[in-house]
Amino acid sequence: MCQIIASIVDVAQVVDQFFDTAHAIQFGPGPPKAITWNAASCSDDELGSCYPFTGDGQFVLTGGYVISALCFMPLGLMDLKENMLWQIISFILTVVLILQFILAFWNKGLSYDNVSLWGESWGDLFGVILFNNALCTCIPAWLYEKKKDVSVSGVVIGSSFCSAVTYIGLGLVGALAMDNVPQNVLEPLSSGYFGAVSNISAQLFAFTVIGLGIPFFCVVTRLNLVSSGLCSNYTGLFILSILPLVLSWTM
């Protein structure tokens, strides 16, 4: 559920940032009131790291969250087979957009001086690895749905290898192209530093690739709980498909 909520927050933030002017409703102190955020309020020094409504300190229901919920909640109520078409679309977009990112980095110029052999901080290494290789949560639900002639070891090993090569390749090329790489590589890509095409691609990546991961993890986690007998299908729908959307707007 933590991964689902984190993804919802990220996607809602991207949707709000996509528009030059974002709208929201602020709750407390006092009665609810409408507030706005404008990209013009960000200085040049904040380019790529200026996000809507981050400094309000109150509960804020943003337009980006509402749009994200309307788009992805219906998909989270489906089963795994019904979601398959959307996951195929997500995979195709992932490949195309990652190739565009690599091309943008390459055109900007690569410098080996930007990357050291061992790095300076390893504090986030294991967290990143665990978060980006969360396929273990998908395997039980996938085993429940897959055809009998599909090789389990072949799919798991093959997908893990391809994912690792993609993560390392994209991260390395991005690090070679930038002097100071932020924690989220989508920040400079969406700031316009790498051009308008990369800006649009980064926004599209966040909304479609990360966004379509929201209903996918809702579905597979729900199937894991239901198939193990821990809860009924309706309880699973509430806990995994509805509750994260109810809670995430407060983050």
Image (tube, rainbow, N blue to C red):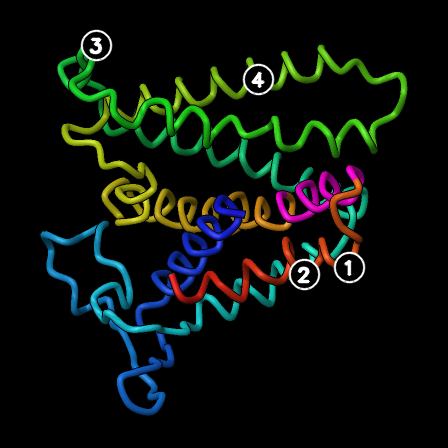
Magenta span: predominant SS is helix
Q: Which residue is farthest front?
A: 230
Task: Check disc 1 and report the residue beneath it.
Answer: 234
The image shows residue 208 at horizontal and vertical percentages of 54, 48
The residue tagged with tag 2: helix, strand or loop? Answer: helix
Residue sitting at x 32%, y 23%: 125
Give the farthest residue toward the top: 117
The residue carrying pointer 2 sits among few (fewer than 14), some (14 to 19) or many (20 or more) residues within 10 Å by Cα, namely few
Residue beneath the point at 27% across and 68% down: 53
Which of the two discs, 4 and 1, labels the residue nearer the N terminus?
A: 4
Q: Is residue 222 rendered magenta in the image?
A: yes
Label whose residue precedes the other's in the sequence (3 or 4): 3
Q: Which residue is drawn at 20% across and 66% down?
A: 55
Mark in front: 1 vs 3: 1
Left or right position of 244 against 142: left
Residue linked to disc 4: 160
- Residue type marked 4: Ser
Residue under label 3, please give it: 118
Please tell me whether mark 4 or mark 1 is closer to you in this view: 1
Q: Residue furthest right?
A: 148
Q: Are marks 2 and 1 in contact (CB under 8 Å)?
A: yes
Q: What stretch is highlighted in magenta?
A: 217-228
- Quadrant into which the C terminus falls: bottom left
Query: Which of pointers 1 and 3 lies earlier in the amino acid sequence?
Result: 3
Q: Mark 2 points at which residue?
A: 238
- Nearest-to-viewer mark from 2 and 3: 2
Q: Position of residue 33 (x, y in %)?
A: 33, 88
Question: Which quadrant holds residue 44?
Answer: bottom left
Identify which amino acid the numbered label 1 is placed on. Answer: Tyr
Q: In this view, does 177 lie above or below 9?
A: above
Find the distance from the CA under tag 1 to the CA under tag 3.
49 Å
